Image (spheres, rainbow, N blue to C red):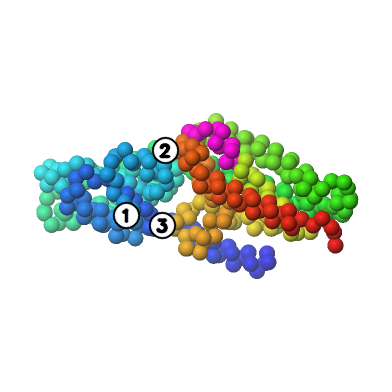
C-alpha cells in the first residue's frame, strides 16, 4: 500500500489540489447607482470564469453580516452616481472588499476584479474617446495588513492536534498488542471502556497543553489576535480533540503492529489534512470529488471554526454548524472504536 497507493494518491492530490488559480468564487455587489455602467461591470464580473455573482446587497449594513456568514469572498461597492461622475469628470470609484482571513485568496480575488474593471475602462475609452479613470480601492476585512499567520495559525492548530492525538493514541493500544501486555490488561478486573479511557486521558491532557502552547505563541510571538472568546476557542478545540482521539483509537483497534498504526496515522492523515482541509489551498477550487472527500476531514471543520472565532470574532452560535459536524464525527468514531475493540485476543 505504501509503495503503490501512496504515489497515486500524491499525484492526484497535488495535481488537482495545488493551483494558484481561483475560479467560481462567490461575490456580492452593492450598487446604489444602478446605472448602465455598473450593470455592465457587474455582468462582466459575474460572467467571468473567476467569479459567480451570488446576490445584490440592498443595505450597506449587510456587508459585515455577509462576510461573517462566509457567503462571499469579495464584495464590490460602486460609488453613487457612478456613470454620471464617469461622464462628467472622467473619474468614478469602486471599493473592493475582500475577506482577509485568507490573504492569499483575498489578494488574488481583488487582482482578478481589478483587471476586469480595467478592461471595462479601456473599452469605454475606445468607445467614447474620453480618458476615463475608474479608481478601484481595496479593503481587506479582519486582516488589513495581510499577515499570512492569520491563515496559517488556525491551520497549524488543527494539524498539530490531528497528528499528535491520532498518532500517539493509535500507537498506544497497538504497542500493547505487539508486546503481549494486552493479555494481562484484558484479564484484569477493568472493563474495556476503562482500558480505552486510560489510554485516552494522558493524550487528551497533552493535547490541551499543546493547544495552549500554540495559542500563546500565536498571540505573543506571531501577533495573531483572538477576537472571539477563549471559552469558545477551547470548547471547539476540546470537541475536536475528542474526534481525533477517537480516530486514533479506531486505527489502533484495527491494527496489531506499532509500525502499521504509525504509518496509517502519519501518512494516512498527513496528506489529507494538509491538502484537503483548507489549510494551504481553497477547497472550492478543487474537483467535486475532492471537495466531497474534504467534507469528511475533521480538520476542515475545525479550521473553519477557529478562523471564524479567532480572526472574525464570531461566537458559538455562528459556528454551530461546524460544532455539530464535529460532535457527530466524534460519536461515530467513538462508537466504531468501541465496537472494533477486541476484548479477547485471538
Drawn side of residue 87 relative to residue 216, left or right: left
- The residue sitting at 59% across, 36% down in the picture is 234
The local secondary structure at tag 2 comes to loop
Viewer-proximal residue, 328 or 131? 328
Quick check: is 236 in the magenta stretch? yes
* Membership of 328 in magenta stretch: no
Tell me which label, 1 or 2, sits earlier in the chain.
Answer: 1
Q: Which marked residue is nearer to the observer: mark 2 or mark 3?
A: 2
In 3D space, how far apart are the residues under numbered discs 2 and 3 (Cα atoms)?
Answer: 23 Å
Q: Which mark is residue 21?
A: 3
Residue under numbered circle 2:
142
Counting other residues with Cα less than 10 Å from the Cα at mark 2, is it few (<14), some (14-19), or many (20 or more)? many
The answer to which of marks 3 and 1 sits earlier in the sequence is 3
Residue nearer the viewer, 50 or 121: 50
Number of numbered tags placed on the structure image = 3
Give the main secondary structure of the magenta stretch: helix
Marking on residue 87: none
Residue 319 in picture, x, y percent from top left: 50, 43
Q: Residue at x 41, y 42 (%)?
A: 68
Task: Name the quadrant of the N terminus.
Answer: bottom right
Q: Which residues are magenta?
A: 225-237
Of discs 3 and 1, which sits in the foreground?
A: 1
Q: Which residue is mark 1?
A: 53
Distance, label 3 to label 1, CA atoms, is 18 Å
Tell me: 18 left or right of 254.
Answer: left
Label 3: element kind: loop
Please say if the residues under marks 1 and 2 sit with CB atoms less than 8 Å apart.
Answer: no
Secondary structure of the residue carrying tag 1 is strand
Residue at horizontal 37%, vertical 44%?
Answer: 66
Residue that extends furthest to the top in the rendered view of this protein: 220
Q: Is residue 275 left or right of residue 199?
A: left
Is residue 240 shown to the viewer in this render?
Answer: yes
Amino acid at each position: 500500500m505504501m509503495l503503490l497507493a501512496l504515489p497515486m494518491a500524491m499525484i492526484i492530490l497535488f495535481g488537482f489540489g495545488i493551483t494558484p488559480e481561483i475560479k467560481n468564487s462567490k461575490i456580492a455587489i452593492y450598487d446604489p447607482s444602478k446605472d448602465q455602467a455598473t450593470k455592465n461591470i457587474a455582468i462582466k464580473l459575474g460572467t467571468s470564469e473567476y467569479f459567480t455573482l451570488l446576490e445584490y446587497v440592498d443595505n450597506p449594513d449587510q456587508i459585515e453580516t455577509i462576510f461573517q456568514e462566509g457567503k462571499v469572498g469579495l464584495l464590490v461597492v460602486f460609488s453613487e452616481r457612478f456613470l454620471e461622475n464617469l461622464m462628467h469628470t472622467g473619474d468614478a470609484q469602486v471599493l473592493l472588499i475582500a475577506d482577509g482571513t485568507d490573504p492569499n485568496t483575498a489578494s488574488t480575488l481583488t487582482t482578478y476584479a481589478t483587471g476586469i474593471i480595467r478592461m471595462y475602462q479601456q473599452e469605454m475609452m475606445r468607445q467614447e474617446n474620453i480618458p476615463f479613470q475608474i479608481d478601484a480601492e481595496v479593503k481587506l476585512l479582519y486582516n488589513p495588513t495581510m499577515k499570512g499567520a492569520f491563515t496559517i495559525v488556525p491551520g497549524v492548530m488543527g494539524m498539530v492536534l490531528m497528528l499528535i492525538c491520532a498518532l500517539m493514541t493509535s500507537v498506544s493500544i497497538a504497542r500493547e498488542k505487539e508486546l503481549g501486555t494486552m493479555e494481562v490488561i484484558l484479564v484484569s478486573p477493568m472493563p474495556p471502556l476503562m482500558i480505552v479511557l486510560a489510554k485516552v486521558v494522558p493524550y487528551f491532557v497533552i493535547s490541551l497543553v499543546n493547544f495552549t502552547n500554540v495559542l500563546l505563541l500565536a498571540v505573543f510571538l506571531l501577533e495573531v489576535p483572538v477576537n472571539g472568546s477563549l471559552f469558545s476557542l477551547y470548547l471547539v478545540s476540546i470537541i475536536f480533540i475528542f474526534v481525533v482521539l477517537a480516530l486514533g483509537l479506531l486505527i489502533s483497534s484495527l491494527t496489531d503492529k506499532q509500525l502499521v498504526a504509525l504509518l496509517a496515522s502519519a501518512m494516512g492523515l498527513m496528506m489529507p489534512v494538509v491538502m484537503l482541509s483548507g489549510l494551504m489551498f481553497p477547497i472550492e477550487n478543487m474537483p467535486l470529488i475532492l471537495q466531497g472527500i474534504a467534507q469528511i476531514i475533521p480538520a476542515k471543520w475545525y479550521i473553519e471554526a477557529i478562523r471564524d472565532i479567532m480572526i472574525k470574532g464570531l461566537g458559538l452560535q455562528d459556528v454551530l454548524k461546524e460544532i455539530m459536524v464535529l460532535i457527530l464525527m466524534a460519536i461515530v468514531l467513538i462508537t466504531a472504536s468501541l465496537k472494533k475493540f477486541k476484548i479477547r485476543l485471538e
